Image (cartoon, helix red, strand yellow):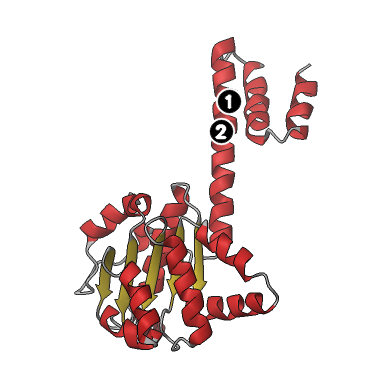
Amino acid sequence: MNKESLEKMIRMRLLGMHQAFKTSIEAESQTPQFTNDELVHHLVQSEWDDRQHRSVQRGLKNANFRYSASLEQLDYSGDRGLDKNLVQRLSGCEFIKKGDDLFITGSTGTGKSFLASAIGQQACLLGYKVLYTNTTKLMSYLKMAKADGTHLKELSKIEKQDVLILDDFGVQPFDAGSRALLLDIIEDRHGKRSTIITAQLPVKKWHEVIGEKTLADAILDRIVHQSIRIELYGESLRKKQKGKAETMETNL
């Protein structure tokens, strides 16, 4: 009977329950482990935990993060402008529940993308749907989708993401098509979903990189006023890490 139950669990894809039941059978061959009620609770909890774990793993994969990063890996040393207390508050993802936006600015190599990835990964662990994308590549992709008539479907997918991370915002100036698409994205998400933006340029220069005053005003008016801002400073972390590696090689 146990063998038949195990086989049916596999066929019904109750993988967590299958593993827990198999383990309990093996354990009970030596000593009784559960009452009937305890066994049912154990099996249900194991299935629940397994599904939650697989859901998180799918979320992390679908998010397509630039870096495999966690909040525990963040470097608060030096005068980087990274406030540990603020990061701890962000780790609870209350800003996502409120639909607030987060801007991370700073020069090349200061860790903007890594920080955004770490916050995004934390959101995934808490069950939020996250999409991480390079801004220029996203606009190019949506333009191609518009050409074949599928861009509305793609915009709908983006709208449903609890967190959209737009990396390297403003590296290239926006043309007319990109401005219109950006406005569509921001309009769909405004007040409902969170957008995290990383940029080398300070927020005060975003207006000119977006271009076309009317659209730039419309876009920035929807995201600037309710945003949380982090500005990173200091030497490039990539350069610093390279220097440490070269020093170690020299010492060897």
Q: Label 1 amino acid? A: Val
83 vs 97, left or right, is: left
Q: Which residue is mark 1?
A: 44
Q: Residue at x 59, y 52 (%)?
A: 58
Q: Label 2 amino acid? A: Trp
Q: Is residue 247 visible?
A: no
Using the rendered view, name the quadrant where residue 167 is placed.
bottom left
Label 2 crowd bin: few (<14), some (14–19), many (20+), radius 10 Å:
some
What element does badge 2 sit on? helix
Percent x, y of residue 145: 65, 75
105 vs 63, left or right, is: left
Name the mark on residue 209: none
Using the rendered view, name the quadrant where residue 137 is placed.
bottom right
Image vertical order of residue 192 relative to residue 5, above or below: below
Percent x, y of residue 122: 41, 54
The front one of 65 and 103 is 103
Q: Residue at x 21, y 57 (%)?
A: 85
Q: Residue at x 36, y 74 (%)?
A: 218
What element does badge 1 sit on? helix
Percent x, y of residue 109: 36, 81
Q: Of all residues shown, which one is farthest toward the left?
A: 79
- Image quarter in which the C terminus is found: bottom left
Q: Is residue 36 visible?
A: yes
Label 1 near label 2: C-beta < 8 Å? yes
Q: Which residue is mark 2?
A: 48
Label 1 crowd bin: few (<14), some (14–19), many (20+), radius 10 Å:
some
The front one of 40 and 165 is 165
Percent x, y of residue 248: 38, 80
